[in-house]
Image (spheres, grey):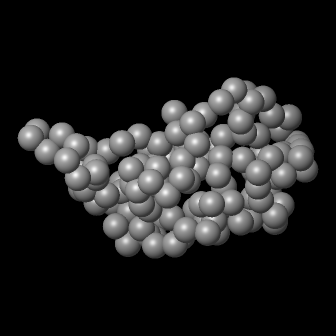
């Protein structure tokens, strides 16, 4: 599994770049045990790209900014949360220093591949 640093994601703009482009730029990191990873689930807005105009990524960056600064209060998942408590302050720090898993980044996509890769198919 490949992930992108939250700090690198926050520097991006516009439509998300695909796996092979981020790999060439050195922005992908192979997951290792112990990494704090935020799994992002999203709806694709295009047939060949998940967010052709970058609108979802802009909203995600705004949400991540709120999360990493502690200005956005969120609660832990239902299976591990105390109903009356928000996330521990250190979780916001972990988020700022963590990684993002987004399928478009993490997995090579058939609709966006490097030149010469599976072109015969």
Considering only vertical position in the picture, is 13 above or below 36?
A: below
Q: Residue at x 55, y 68 (%)?
A: 12
| Residue 72 in sight from this viewpoint | no
Splitting the image into 4 quarters, where does residue 68 fall? Answer: bottom right
Q: Residue 110: where, in percent of width, then height? A: 25, 44
Q: Residue at x 71, y 66 (%)?
A: 65
Q: Residue at x 83, y 38 (%)?
A: 83
Q: Residue at x 80, y 34 (%)?
A: 81
Q: Residue 82: where, in percent of width, then height? A: 86, 34
The front one of 16 and 60 is 16
The front one of 38 and 74 is 38
The front one of 34 and 74 is 34
**Could you tell whether 23 is left or right of 35 in the image?**
left
**Could you tell whether 41 is left or right of 9 in the image?**
left
Splitting the image into 4 quarters, where does residue 59 fall? Answer: bottom right
Q: In which quadrant will I find the C terminus? A: top left
Q: Residue 60: where, in percent of width, then height? A: 58, 62
């Amino acid at each position: 599994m490949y992930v992108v640093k939250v700090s690198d994601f926050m520097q991006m703009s516009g439509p998300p770049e695909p796996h092979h482009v981020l790999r060439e730029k050195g922005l992908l990191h192979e997951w290792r045990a112990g990494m704090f990873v935020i799994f992002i689930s999203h709806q694709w807005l295009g047939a060949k790209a998940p967010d052709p105009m970058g609108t979802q990524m802009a909203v995600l960056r705004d949400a991540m900014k709120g999360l990493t600064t502690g200005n956005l209060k969120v609660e832990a998942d239902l299976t591990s949360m105390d109903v009356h408590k928000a996330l521990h302050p250190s979780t916001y720090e972990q988020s700022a220093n963590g990684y993002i898993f987004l399928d478009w980044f993490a997995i090579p996509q058939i609709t966006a591949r490097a030149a010469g890769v599976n072109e015969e198919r």
